[in-house]
Amino acid sequence: MFLDEISIQTSILIYAGLGFVFFLGLGYYFFRNPIKKGNSVSWSLILGCIRGLILTSLLIAIFPFKIFENSNLKEPVEFIFVVDFPKLMSQDFDQTFKKVDSILKIKHPDLIWIDFSGRAVMNFKKPFSVSHSLNRLNQTLRKFNKGHSNKEIFILTDGNLNDLNIELASNIHLIPYGKILNKEQVEFSTTHLPIVSVPGEEVHLPIEVWVKNFKQNKNVIIDVYVDGVFLKKKKISFDSDHTYVITDVSVKSTKLGKHKINVSLGNGLSTFIDWNVLKEKVIVYGFSDALDPDVGVLNRVAKNKFIKLIWNFDVNAKIPDEADKFIFMRILPNMTLKRRIMNSSVLFLNTSKDKIELYLDRIKSERHLKMVGESLWDLQMKDFQSQGSYVQTDSTIGAWFEDLYMNNAHTLDSLNKNRLALVDDIFTQGFSNSSLGRNEPKLNFLANKNKIDLLEIEELDKADFVRKGLNSNFRDDSIFIWQNMYFKLWVLMLILAEWLIRKFIELR
């Protein structure tokens, strides 16, 4: 209902106004009808109690009291099946994939496999481009989950994954496959995407190092060079309990331009990363029909993300030829710009979804984000009242900016990169050339995380796929008391009852 969309500030003003009007009418009534000794005591007591309840209710509504509301969640458990294709396909993998599929289909006849990007896998064929990033998979799972967590995710994988140090959505069952190699090997991976920063910004370069088929304690040295000049050295220690380590190296520069980072291990493995230092990471053009508090919220988050926002509040404003990243607030661009908008990164804010989809011919694209609902300013105020900061609002808007503008900017950055090499997945990270076979260190690292377990192929037909305690019948939501519909009806009923009793006394 529309009452649920009213902001905190607006609701307080409404209830304060109701209280003022009520007491103004009350004062006028007693001015015209002074209390006389002959009036009925019972009617006076009833009126007095109702007015007291109205006053109490209005005071509760004006101050931001909260209540807990239980919502029944009796959603069925759903299953998602994901396959992590190996870097090099083999007959062994093909047979393993089909075997796992046949076992799972006994309990799930409608089973459909997807890859990390959410694309359906047809006839066990490997897609043209494959991602091995758990960060990418996490985004895919969130889209499938649609805000709910009662999903069981099965991932057929050899463990040669990246971005392991993130919290995965839902419950995860890892089904390992691949040969366990006997030779001890030290491997590492880091991002192969170009890094973009601004002068003085500290960039943290993620580095994953692991020992396959551990045999003895050892130290591994990581050397980092920038433009051929040694920058720093980092030592990592391994023992039988720590065969997989995630670390990072920070780099920063005050010099504008392109740089080359070289990360190398003592065993000869190395990789190069392009680094571009710019005045600002991204320039985004914003258009709105009027100045709005939401503009200030967007500007604050953009500044923290080193994004330059250029606003124009003229509906008929001309869009610069070089612009390819936009925000349209409460308005839609001119139809003559439709082809250009379709190929640009655009955030549509507080415009009807039906109008946006009609404008875009109902074509879905990851470069178009449509957000409709409560204003950003109101969300910011709620965030501040509940947590004392804007952290939730900032992270939400920051994620929009990163997904729409910054990640796309990396993909299309002018670093003379082969565009086809990056089109698959902006989160994809590289492997050393020897990353073959089952990666036990990474699998064991993941298995120690909450909500993740290992299910060997031999255990599939006996395993209970649903975790205990997964389906909770209740969810406690903390809401402001004025947001409860019953409270609104209670206040309305009290005011109506007081008015009816007073009119009844007048008619007598």
Image (spheres, helix red, strand yellow):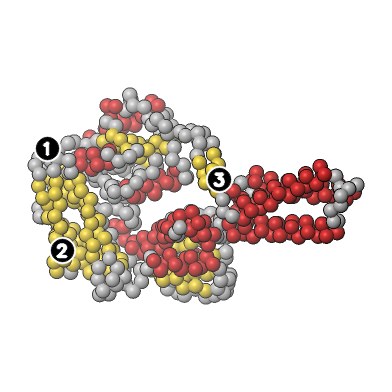
Q: Amino acid at mark 2?
A: Lys
Determine the CA span between mark 1 and mark 3: 59 Å
Q: Secondary structure at mark 1?
A: loop
Q: Is residue 125 left or right of residue 308?
A: left
- Disc 1 residue crowd, few under 14, some 14–19, many 20+, Cα 10 Å: few
Q: Position of residue 102 (x, y in %)?
A: 34, 28
Q: Position of residue 217 (x, y in %)?
A: 10, 44
> Which mark, residue 67?
3
Q: Is residue 39 left or right of residue 405?
A: right
The residue furthest right is 508
Determine the CA span between mark 2 and mark 3: 54 Å
Residue with the mark numbered 1: 182
Residue with the mark numbered 2: 232
Q: Amino acid at mark 3?
A: Ile
Residues under numbered marks 1 and 3 in contact, where contact means CB atoms less than 8 Å apart: no
Q: Is residue 331 left or right of residue 17?
A: left
Q: Residue at x 18, y 69 (%)?
A: 227
Q: Is residue 386 left or right of residue 260?
A: right
Q: Position of residue 445 (x, y in %)?
A: 24, 42
Q: Residue at x 21, y 67 (%)?
A: 260
